[in-house]
Image: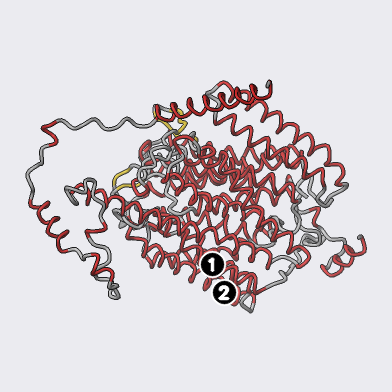
Amino acid sequence: MAASKAQGSYLAVFWTAITVLCAGIAYFAEGFGKLVLVFGLAGVIISLVGFLKIKPLEGKTAGVTGIAAMKILGIAVALGGWFVTIAGLHLTTSTGGRLIFALVGIAVSLVGVLGVLPVAFGKSVAGKAQSSSFMAAKTTMEHSR
Amino acid sequence: MKKLCRRSCLGLWVLALGLAFGLAVHAQAPAPAAPAPAAAAAPAPATPVDAELKDAAGKAPSQADLQKGDPSGAITGTISDVPAADSKAGVTLPDVANQVGQNKIAVNFVWTLVCGFLVMFMQAGFAMVESGLTRVKNANHTYMMNFFVYTCGLFAYWIIGFAIQMGGAAGNSNLGGLQPLASEHAISIFGKMWGLWGQSGMFLVGHTYDVGVMVIFLFEMVFMDTALTIVTGACAERWKFLAFTVSSIIMGALTYPLYGNWAWGGGWLSQLGTNVGLGKGYCDFAGSGVVHAVGGITALAVCMLIGPRIGKYNRDGSANAILGHDVSACLIGCFILAFGWFGFNPGSTLGASANGNLRIGTIAVDTMLAGCTGTIGAILYMWALKGKPDYSMSGNGLLAGLVAITAPSGFVSPVSSCIIGLVAGVLVCLSCSFFENVLKVDDPVGAISVHGANGLWGVLSVGLFADGTSNYGGSWNGVTGSVTGLFYGDASQLVAQLVGISTLIGVVFTISMVINLALEFFIGHR
């Protein structure tokens, strides 16, 4: 779907709301700051609901859906690698030991990011053309319009 | 009559309000200085320095001399231009000392601001590179994303991002101390305090309405916008404008500033040296990690979510080359970026006048050389393996060298910078091929490889090549001494850099992925 008035309106609400929300955070210590924060939060929620409401107007898009559980696993593994690195800083004081922990942590994170998540997102399923060559794919795309 | 009465009352009310306001302003005005005690008012005995100053004042060119013009510049800028606190006493030693201090800060302000302006101009380079590498039907969309990302990022950074990143970054003597930025939220773990985010500077009001804060805001803002515009390149030709806008606002408000605080704003990565004895803490001179790797890694997360362009991959998984539409835009854009990099790296000293800041020449030369060898590496690699030099990879080689030298530029020698750039030039070719053919991640401009892979390489190279000759006031991140890498005898610096890399891959990627998954649910990225 191309840009629409509804998108613009809800974006304006979102933009205003986060500004008000940040003003609430900035003046949180004062009484009216908390009130402003609540107004800002309400505005953000309204804008998000608005975005959700107009989303079906898109129709079918070429985005990838993927497997939810694999996505969570991939993210967890990526974050887990960082915990390994951080744990190493406290488990040992030797530079060599910390170096090993850091390398293992990075390797674990990379498994999550480059190993699990691409599988979770289905490795380009949506991007596959209808035929084996790009020119044919292009023709197919043009016909489908 | 009633009308007249009402008008008179209104007039009186306005008058009373004005009076009250005037009183309030008067009450807030500083009280006039109390007359100095008689003993203090007595003239101090003239020192030899005072006598020399008076002598110099006597020899200063007169108004009549100056009216004749000064073609050689020999009589412009003398003791006559130093303001005296007491015109009767003339210029004194404290007057001269104050002027020297102000000159130092002024030089640093001008240097930092001009470098910031150069970095701002890089937005034009990014727009040209990204649009040149995309198809003509999507050029307008890509240009528009590059144009609007500046606004989205700037606004988000002003309302909260700057406070999160730099709210606790007080203490930079180059810019006058930045004392209004002295509020860092920290937690205690294993008996040590670790900074997590800054707390002062939202909307630049209150105490942060300060000349030094404005300078650092401008400089850090343009860096942040560079990170944001990396994502638009990787997601070009298929990113819904609404999703791009909201994603960019959140990145400028949260993702980028968080890592920026940990590395540059007094956060926990910069404290690895003082808290656990890892070298001089995590060192990222101008932002291979903070700017480029954060941008590249976020781009990877969004690219995975958004999927490839239609027609990019065949059913058997092989990739089709989708050529860009404008070689000239791409390569001129690369030159604009290379020019802007002279603001990026040398400007990151945040000053030209202080202990160690004269290294700006070395930093500029390092930047030049790494870009040069990056281009050589990419061209030779493509020529030797594919049979001809490829224009897009040549441009990416230049940018890869520049990205890689961004973190180590303040700490390494010209020879090391050549090696770092050369490795980056080859790495960008290998990385582009890996993401396209193995991971099936469609990145039209190679942003993930240029900024993500080489950003990480830049961070790592500090821990390898830093030669221990830099001396920015005698310490870095609160640890005395110069930053020294593994090849020059300090393995612990390498560990600090690896912790930074682990944080980029483990934490920054996760934050970006979770935020953009939420946006996928509410808005949809395509």
Q: Is residue B212 left or right of residue A13?
A: left
* Residue under label 2: B379
Please indicate whether residue B25 sits to the left or right of residue B506 in the image.
Answer: left
Determine the residue located farthest toward the bottom in the rendered image. B387
User: Can marks 2 and 1 be said to lie on one chain?
Assistant: yes
Rate crowding at label 1 as few (under 14), some (14 to 19) or many (20 or more) other CA atoms within 10 Å: many
Q: Chain of mark 2?
A: B
- The chain ID associated with circle 1 is B
- Percent across and percent down for residue A136 are 87, 68
Q: Position of residue B44 (x, y in %)?
A: 9, 42
Which residue carries the number 1 mark? Answer: B425
Horizontal and vertical percent position of residue B112 = 42, 55
| Quadrant of the image containing the N terminus of chain B | top right
B432 above or below B51?
Answer: below
Crowd tier of the residue under label 2, counting other residues whose Cα lies within 10 Å: few below 14, some 14–19, many 20 or above? many
When the figure is inspected, residue B253 is found, relative to residue B415, above or below; the finding is: above
Query: Does residue A105 show up?
Result: no
Q: Please tell me the numbered disc located at residue B519.
A: none
Secondary structure at badge 1 equals helix
Viewer can see residue B490: yes
Residue under the image location 29 percent in, 72 percent down: B69
Q: Does label 2 or label 1 sit earlier along the sequence?
A: 2
Is label 2 in contact with label 1 (beta carbons under 8 Å)?
Answer: yes
Residue B334 versus residue B45: which sits nearer the camera? Answer: B45
Amino acid of disc 2: Ile
Q: Where residue A13 appears, x then y in whole percent?
A: 73, 37
